[in-house]
Image (cartoon, grey):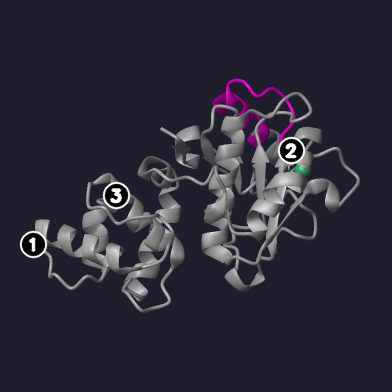
Amino acid sequence: MRFVTRETWGAIVPRSQLRPLKDAKVKGIVVHHTTGPAIEPGHMIGAHDRYHKHTRGWSGGLAYNWLVSADGRIWEGRGWNQGGATKNWNDKSVAVAYIGDSNDHLPKSAKVALVTVFDAVHAKYGRDLWIKVHSDFKATDCPGSELRDWVQDEASALLSKGVSEASERPTTVDEWDALIRFLQGLRAAVRASPLRRWRRNNQYAVMAVQNVLNIKGFQAGKVDGKYGKRTKRAVLSFQATQFLPRNGVVGIATWDALFPA
Ligand SMILES: [Zn+2]
């Protein structure tokens, strides 16, 4: 499994409920590393959780929103709730951490996982978010040299032109599926505003649809987030196989048929 929930890795249950981030307040992404070993992330994440909770005294425990491990898995920290890793910025940013020390090494699989998370954050909070590193906010070595260089040289540029154009953007349904909650967010967006031609659609929802249609063999064309003729034709063909009303619109029923829970 590529996505690990809090329940699965055994996060300490916070005494009070975590506070959700407010969409309008989120301005960007702050990248951290946890330091410590990169091996056995399932063990390490528990150790970092206990450290933040008991040693640092942070009631919410593990302070990062999302983490990635060297093996490319994505781990849920505080998720879409307020983090605690970037002083003064915890209600305005999403903290993403690499489990390990990037001064040692930052494997490509971790970078791919990071891009997946950035993509999800973008889809949730908008495309004009900035991406910075912890040392932009205070004198600290975090997130280590390799991550800092990568974020500053590559990841920021990658975000400024839209993650969707990045070569490492997730393109398989397996990778999209990795962020279950992300998909749930898209589902809510589709419920509120079905996807159709000649409409300003949620670009990431359209990409997810195109992607899964292609995998199912319906030939939606390029996964570009644009609901064009080919996408509509593929949706129509898919609907015909599902006994859904053939209208070429992805409403909630078609969405659920494409992405069974
Ligand atoms: Zn940090």
Instruction: Provide the residue designation for mark 2.
Output: 147
Q: Does any atom of ligand 1 lie closer than 8 Å to the CB of label 2?
A: no
Q: Amino acid at mark 1?
A: Phe
Establish if 54 lies above or below 181. Answer: above
With 128 as the anchor, is 132 left or right in this view?
A: right
Instruction: Please identify the residue farthest to the right as the structure is shown.
Output: 139
Q: Is residue 69 left or right of residue 222?
A: right
Residue 69 can be seen, yes or no = no
Question: Would you say residue 218 is visible in this rendering?
Answer: yes
Name the residue located 55 percent from the left edge and 44 percent from the top edge. Answer: 167
- In this view of the protein, which residue sits in the foreground, 45 or 136? 136
Outermost residue toward the bottom in this view: 198
* Horizontal side of residue 94 vs 234, given as left or right: right
Depth-wise, is mark 3 or mark 2 nearer the camera?
Answer: 3
What amino acid is at disc 3? Asn
Is ligand 1 closer than 8 angstroms to the Cβ of mark 3? no
Q: Residue at x 18, y 73 (%)?
A: 247
Dot 3 falls on a residue whose secondary structure is helix
Quadrant position of ligand 1: top right
Where residue 204 appears, as percent x and y from the top left, is 44, 60
* Circle 2 residues within 10 Å: few <14, some 14–19, many ≥20: many
**Dot 3 alpha-carbon crowd within 10 angstroms: few under 14, some 14 to 19, many 20 or more:** some
Q: Which residue is mark 3?
A: 214
Q: Who comes first in sequence, dot 1 or dot 2?
A: 2
As for residue 38 lying within the magenta part, the answer is yes
Q: Which residue is mark 1?
A: 243
Identified by mark 2, the residue type is Leu
Image coordinates of residue 249 in percent, x first then y, are 25, 71
Cα separation, mark 1 vs mark 2, equals 49 Å
Q: Which residues are magenta?
A: 33-49
